[in-house]
Each structure stands twice: as structure tokens, then as C-alpha cells.
Image (spheres, rainbow, N blue to C red):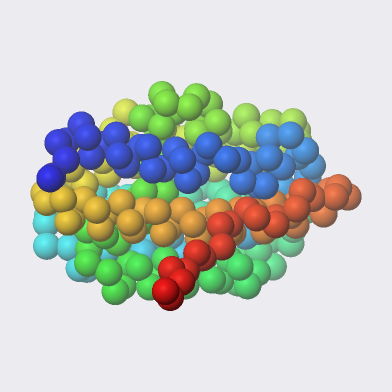
Amino acid sequence: MTRTSEEFREAILDLLQAMRWDTPTLLEDYLRNHLTREGALVYGLEHCVFAANFPRWLANITGNCPHLDVRKYLIENMYVEEVKDPTIPTGHYESLVDFAEELGADRDFVLGYTGAPVTKMRISYCDWVSRTKPWLEAFAAIAGNEVARGKAMIERIGERARTSRRTFESLGLSEKALAHWDAAEQADGGEGGHGDAPLGFLDKYATTQEAQDACLAAMAERQEVNRIWSDQVGVWAFEASGLTPPSIDKRQPRPMPVLAA
């Protein structure tokens, strides 16, 4: 039976809360409890690569989407990412490069860096989803990551879900280096922002139980990929800070096959 609008919204938030927040990733543990410049740079470098690719996935979905209102939203999102972020004087991606540079990286290196293997796999997954899945499932997978940091999720679990400069304030960075996180907080956590608006589109266009189930499955798969990435980057961040990282054993459930009779 097709879920009501409220039931579908709650199912989305339940899934994202369970997969993203109920068990903290090693990266979240590191950023909140063990942060140093060295470890922040590990994260910053990999996140720069992710941010450089994110608008391409929005463009892929836009090209497959038949609905003007969704295309308009995706193009506006891309414009903020690629052309002009209205909240800061530099571009959205460039402001993240500023963050990595102040942590000690050479700027040209950051601009040319293509990511660790686990980051390349995360990017390849998002490329595959956005190019080959039906537009609605692709939208659920890609936009679900923003919903996980949106206003509705912040109301559920508190400040853990908010993208914020406060995560990095202990490092004593400049306003220029922290500007990216102000922009990200404004984009995702505000009323009607990128973390809020996708819920309305998913409700509008996932009009059958089959479509709703497909969207939830796409979100779940994307979050599984995110957790693998976040746990591994978290390990490297601990190590860069001279700390012994927690074990990643059993962080992902192993497949459980149905045995033959």
C-alpha cells in the first residue's frame, strides 16, 4: 500500500537517521572528539575531490528528468556549487580548497588531487547512479545525502546533523578557511534549503509504493557507500594525528546467504 506523504517523509528520515547517525562513523568520532590539523587535512583533501564532482551528478540527473520544477531546483543547486555561492565571496568549491590550503596543503596539489582509491570508488558509484538509474531513484540517492544534514534531521537528532564551522573552530583557522562551512550550513540546514526541498520532490513524484520503495533502496545503498568511505577516511585521520584508530572490523555487516536445503 502506498505510504501517505507523512509516512513517506518519516520513512526517509528513519532510514537516513539509522544509516547515517545512529552509529557514528569513525570520521564523525574523529572530527568531534580527536581533531587536529593533520587529521582535518586528510578529510579536507578527500572532501575536495568529492565536492569537485558533486555538480556533475546533479547535471546527470537533470538531463534525465522530465519535470521542469525538479530541473530548476537541480540547476539552481548547480549554480550555487559552480558559478556563484550567494553566502560567500569565493566559489563553493574554491572555498573548500581554501580550507585545505590553510591546513597546510599546497594549493596546486589540492586542485590536481584525484583522491584516494576509496574516494574514487565513492565517486564512481555516484557517477553510476546518476547516469544509469531512473531519474527519481538517482535523485533520491544523491539528494538524500543533503537531507541527512537538513532541517528535518537537525530537529530529530540535534546539532550532530548540522554542517557547521563549529566542528573546526578549535583549530584556530581564519575566516577565509572557515567560509565554506558557513556556506554549507546555509545551503543544507536552512528552511527550504538543499536538505529540505528534496523531501517535497520525492513525495510529489514517488506516487506508488514501488516508486517509494525504490527511492528508499537507492538512499540506503548510497549511505552504505558513504559509511565505508567515512570509516576509512576516519582511520587515516586518526593515524595522521598520531592516534591508534578504532578497529573497522564488523563496521559493515557481511552478506548472509540463504543456504540450500
Q: Is residue 150 left or right of residue 4?
A: right
Quarter of the image for residue 120 reads: bottom right
Q: Is residue 75 left or right of residue 219?
A: left
Q: Is residue 28 left or right of residue 2?
A: right
Q: Position of residue 55 (x, y in %)?
A: 39, 60
Furthest residue to the front? 261
| Quarter of the C terminus within the rendering | bottom left
Quarter of the image for residue 154 reads: top left
Q: Position of residue 137 (x, y in %)?
A: 26, 60
- Whether residue 150 can be seen here: yes
| Quarter of the N terminus within the rendering | top left
> In this orientation, which residue lies closer to the viewer: 248 or 70?
248
Q: Position of residue 95 (x, y in %)?
A: 56, 48
> In this orientation, which residue lies closer to the viewer: 206 or 179?
206
Furthest residue to the right? 242
Q: Image point 65% across, 55% down: which residue? A: 250
Q: Image point 79% across, 42% down: which residue? A: 36
Quarter of the image for residue 249 reads: bottom right
Q: How many discs appear?
A: 0
Q: Position of residue 74 (x, y in %)?
A: 27, 54
Q: Image point 21% across, 47% down: which residue? A: 202
- Whether residue 49 can be seen here: no
Q: Image point 39% across, 43% down: which residue? A: 15
- Say if 73 sits above or below 58 in the image: above
